[in-house]
Structures are given as C-alpha cells and as structure tokens.
Amino acid sequence: MPKRVLIVDDAVFMRNMIRDIFSSGGYEVVGEAAHGIEAIEKYRTLKPDLTTMDIVMPYKSGIEATREIVRGDPKAVVVICSALGQESLVMEAIEAGAADFIVKPFRAEDVLAVVKKVLGETPKV
Amino acid sequence: MSRYLGLFVAEASEHLEALGKDLVSLEGTPSAETVDSLFRHAHSVKGMSASMGLEPIAQLAHRVEDLVDVARRVPGALGRDRVDLLLATTDTMLALVRGTGEGNAPAPQPELLGKLSEAVVALTGQQPRPTKVARVDPLTPGTAAPISARRFEVRLRILPSAQSPGPRAFLVYKKLTGLGTVTNLRPPLEDLRAGSIPDGRVALVLETDGGLEPVQTALALVPEVELVSAEPMVEAPAGPPAAAPVPAEAARTVRVRTELLDDFLEMAGELLLATARLRDIGRHFPEHGRPVLEEGVDRLHALVKDLHGKVMGARMTPVAVVTDQLPRAARDLARKRGKEVEVMVTGAEIEIDRAILDAIAEPLLHVLRNAVDHGIESSEARVSVGKPPRGRLGISVRRTRERVVIELEDDGRGMDAEKLRASAIARGKLSPEAAARLSTREALLLACLPGVSTATDVDDVSGRGVGMDAVKRSVESLGGALELDSQPGRGTRVTLRLPLTVAVVQLLLVRAGGEVLGLPITKVLGAVEVPDGALQRSPSVNLLTYGVQLVPAHDLARLLELPSGPTPRTRPWVVMESEDGTVALGVEALLGQEEAVLKALSRPLDRVPGLAGVTILGNGRPVFILDVPRLLV
C-alpha cells in the first residue's frame, strides 16, 4: 500500500509541483491545505503517513501548525519545506517537532530520497 | 578537521601520559587492571589518530595494542626491555601528537613498528595483523556496547551534499537529545546552528540507558548524515590508588583553556576591587541615601565574593597532574644511572591552584632528580649496607587547613649536615661561629645556597639546571616554605609547604616615608609599639626585644630609600619572617588589613628588588606589596 501524503503550502503552484514529485515516487497524495489552520484540521481527519509543511503561510505558520500536529500525534511525520536563508526558521520548526526538512528549489530525487529515509524506507546499511 | 586538532592533541596526550604511567607501574606491580588500562589507552589513541587521518600515530598505537593484547594472555610477557620499547613508543607517539599540534605531519616510524612486530612475533610466533588503520571501522550494530555502558562517544558527519548543514546538524542533535543527555558537543551548539561545522564532523557524548540501538535507528532515519562511530566510553581510572569508580557526575566536565581560567580570576579580582571602590565612594554620600546604597553594595560584595570563590574552585587542579610524571622520570633517571628505584605516590588527588601547580612542576622534578642521583645508592651499595636493592622514593601529598604539603622522601644515603657546614664555611658563605650556631635542619638548608651542595659531580642528571637554591626560591615566591630533614645513611625528606591559592593575599597596610605599603600577612609574626630608646644599638644593626628574642630592627623608609621625617619617640614595629630569620620593620603607622588581589609587576618595575607585586585598594590607589626577604639582601 502506498504511503499517504498531505501537502501544506499557500501557493497552488508549489502544491502542484510537490504533488507531481510524490506521485512520480509512488506515493498517494490524500489531501492539500493552504494554511496552518487547514493543515491541522486535515491532519486530524486524514491521518497521513507524511505531511509536507511550508513555513510562511497566512492565518497560522507552518511552525505553529507543526507544533500542534505533533502535540496531538507525537508520531506525526512532518517534513518542512524551506528555502535557503530560512535556516533559523527550520530550526524553530525542528524544535516544534518537525521530523525533517527539504530545501527549495526542489529536485524530485532529493525530495524523494529524504522522504524515503525519514519514513524508514531506505534499507539500513 | 583543524578545529578538532587542539582537542585531539589534548586528549591523545592525556591518554599517552596515562599509558606511560601504566607502563611504569606495570614494572613495579603488574596487575590485570593495569594491562586493561594500557590497552584502553592505546586503543583510544588509535581510534582518535585514525579519525584524524594520522596514520603513523595510529599504526604505532595499533602495534602497542597488539603487544599489550599478547600480554593479557601471556603472563610475564612485558619484561623490562619490552616496557622500555613500549615507553619509547609512547614517547614517540607523544612527540608526534604534539608535533601535529604545531602543524607538523607525523612521520612514519618503520623502525619502531618493526621492533614492536618482532616483540609480538617472539611472543606468539605469529605475524601481527596488518597495520593499515587510518580508516574508521564500520560500525557493527549491537555488538559494540556492553549492556552496562551508559555513555557513548558518537561521531557523525554531515555529508557535503547537505544544503543546510546547520539545520541538518541541529536535527541530529535534537534527535539525540530525545534519547538521552548530550554533552561535550563539538562544535558547540552555537556553531552547529550557524552551520559552522568543519568538514561536517560532529562529535558528542551521549548518556543514555537505552544502549546504542535506538541511536542507530534514529540516525538511520536522518538523511545527509553518516554515523562515523559510536563507542561506549571507558572512564579513565582515577590516579593511584585507583579504587573507587568515577561517579557519573564527576565525568560531566568540559575542557576549558587554562588562560580562560586566568582571565576569569583576573576579572573576578577586578570585580572585588570595583566593589570595594564603590563602597568607598558610598562613604561620601549624603546620610539619607547611604543605607540603600550600602545595602546594595553589601549584596554585590557577597555575590562577587561568591563568584571569586567559585572561580578559585574551578582553578583547583589535582596534584596528580604533576606527580603522575614523577614515577616515569625517576625510573628513566635510575636506569641511566644503573640504579633501581620504586616510586610511591599518595594523595595525588588533592587539589591546588593550577598556577601553583605550574610553578612547582619543575622544582619537584629537580628534587626528585636529586633524590635519584645523589640520594639513592646503587643496588650493590645498598645491599652492602643491608638495604633492599631497590631504592624507595615516597611522594606524599596532604592537605592541612590552609596549605598543601608535598613530601618527597627517599631511603638513600642522606645528607651530611657537617659536610654542608664545612662547605659553606670554605666557600665563605658563613663564618665558623655562625655555622656552629645552626641547628641540623638549618644546616641542611645550606644545600640551598648557590654552590654549597656537597655533590661533587656535575652531570646531566641534576648537576645542572635549577639547583636547590632555585627550588627554595620558587617555593618561597609562591608564599610557601621548604624544609629539609635528613639522616646520614637513612635518607632525606624534602617538604614543600604550599598555599592553596596564590592570587589573593592578606595585606597589612603600613605607612612608611609617607607612602602606603603592603606587607604579606602570612609573613607577619606580630606588631609592637616601642619607644625608640628601647632599641638596643649595636654598631652594625639595632636590635628590638620581641618576646624572648632579639630581632634586627630596620627602618622601613630608610630601607626603601624614602624620605623619612624625624624619628618619633614611639612608633610601631612589624615583626616579620624573612630568609635570615626574624626581622622588625619600623613604620610610621599601621593602617589596617586588606584582602588584595596580587597583580604581577611588569617591566621595568619587576626589576626593582624588594617589590613582590602591586594591588589596587578600594580607594583606587595602587599599593606596592613588599617582598621583605629580598629587601634585606
């Protein structure tokens, strides 16, 4: 059974791009959210295996959303979508409970490598 | 990598020094624990050097490990010659390690490697394993750590492909803190977060009850990170008698550069002075505002004093840092002279300010050299007078209320007070009458006068370098005292009485020649007020009656060549200890006591005889502290 993914980003363009990457990697994108509040709601109902989380979003930031999601489900796997120059925000998100992060601009194979690793799909060496 | 170099040099040197110490003690009383400890130190050095890519050092350590490993199985494998070889190898490794600290790449040591291999072959009949070790062994999950291990040294590498090494490393750090307590993080967290991670290498100590497996599992889920090694940490055994296991708290330490400790002390001292200054200013405040200010200053003073005490505490270092070197030094010297000596150290765990420790390292070594060279006899000579063939040298450290006492006692031929008297007279240092008046103990101290020692030979063992006079001077410049006891034929005991700390001195403030001057209270025996007419005049010097003693009396202002007014009818005299016995100093007034932070004098003032240092009083005024013995020379 493919792993189920929730994509959180306020830009439709980014959501589409991330969706394509995951689909190409054999994952099932089960939902999308455009801001933090929506992300928390969708996470509760969908219980995805993995959530990608943009940081800067309206209503509620990705950091806050991550904090609340992980508080509700300590096993939640949230991967932060960041850009170069956002290092301190990423570390804040890690403090908040993010499992890992990817750095824009996204390259499909990099993103998939990280996701595989985080989900424990890479055979241990 | 260069970032780790300092740490590598420090840690590897420590292991190598411990290795040398173990080797020496192995020769005295071999024990399985010592062999194990040897092995661990060699192993640690091997791992560290390999991680640093320093193959020549790693190879040597590897061979030492091999040979020691054989010794575990073959009792008596480490005879004197093999211990010699291992000591030589240890020295070479130490030199190479220190060399890398100065930027020199270690040179391969084929000759030593060959000798070590030969030793292994001779013992086992088998070639040792190949020595290519500058590659980190792959981690074998599960097998590495015994269940009991709680502390692990974890080394990681953030792959160069990582786009954000800072967050990447921080993520790893967070994951590990979720598993246990992380200490000794290198680079420090700040650097880590900033992505300043040389070569991507991160090292830390993880304290966890869960063993290594969760660590491996957690790290397997983190991309762009490679687990280089994770090994259970072996606590270094405490100095002899290494009985008690090191409590977990004791191991939670950080390394601090010693200069930093000096800076801390300096600053804590400055704070003390600044507080005193503030208090002084408060005295000139209008009455109504004063209580509040004084309360604040009192609180500040309490805090600063506490801080000062803590800094002093942090500077305390076990005497072992110095005494650990001594058995090895004694052994090497004894071998050179064809003698045998066994060194016993007790009380090495006692702590003393590191500045004092630094200052006594060389003098102690000299006293030890004297003992081996001039004290301990050759085995034949010892047997002929009914002593055991192997000489004994006891080094004991103990703590009294305000002092640390270090005693070095040998069972050698002892010193001859008569010969020393004669030698001092012959060299014109002493009149025959004065020599006759000296007690035996005082006569022995004549050995400390330059050129009076009765040893006739000059050689590289102890004839050159610092003599006993220099030893005495070093000890006294620290505010300590040196004592000698000896019985011809039975042995000699050298006692160093040292203050626990040097930095703060209690001063007696006096006025002389219109100047305020400080006298170290440790040297003050007392003060008396005496009418001028009560002095007994003699042609060379005036004498003051102090108790039952007649004490030479000097006018302090005149000694310092300060302008002095007409001599008052009655004035205070401060009676002090000095090199030539007790002395009384006439002053204009006693001004009080003060705790002062001694500051060393810089040029050209350090050239002025009789000045020990300078301090700044609460009122901001600088005050010279007098070195009374030097004043009278």
Image (cartoon, helix red, strand yellow):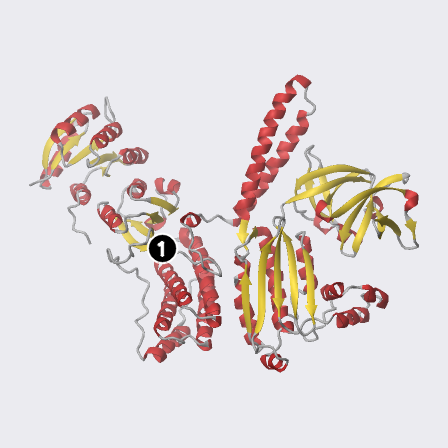
Instruction: Assign the C terminus of chain B to one quadrant of the image.
Output: bottom right
Relative placement, left or right, of A104 versus B617 is left
Callout 1 amino acid: Met
Relative placement, left or right, of B400 versus B416 is left
Residue lying at the far top in this picture: please name it: B288
**In the rendered view, would you say B281 is above or below B12?**
above
B291 and B203: which is toward the camera: B291
What residue is disc 1 on? B233
Relative placement, left or right, of B77 versus B396 is left
Q: Position of residue B10 (x, y in %)?
A: 46, 56
Which residue shows up at 12% across the image and 30% down it? A46
Mark 1 lies on a secondary structure that is loop
Looking at the rendering, which quadrant does residue A63 occupy?
Answer: top left
Q: Is residue B99 visible?
A: no
Q: Position of residue B305 (x, y in %)?
A: 59, 37
Q: Position of residue B101 (x, y in %)?
A: 46, 57
Q: Position of residue B151 (x, y in %)?
A: 34, 51
Looking at the rendering, which quadrant does residue B494 occupy?
Answer: bottom right
Q: Is residue B602 visible?
A: yes
B598 and B581: which is toward the camera: B581
User: How many labels were placed on the picture?
Assistant: 1
Relative placement, left or right, of B630 versus B178 is right
A43 and B399: which is toward the camera: B399
Q: Residues within 10 Å of mark 1 (few under 14, many from 20)?
A: some
Q: Chain of mark 1?
A: B
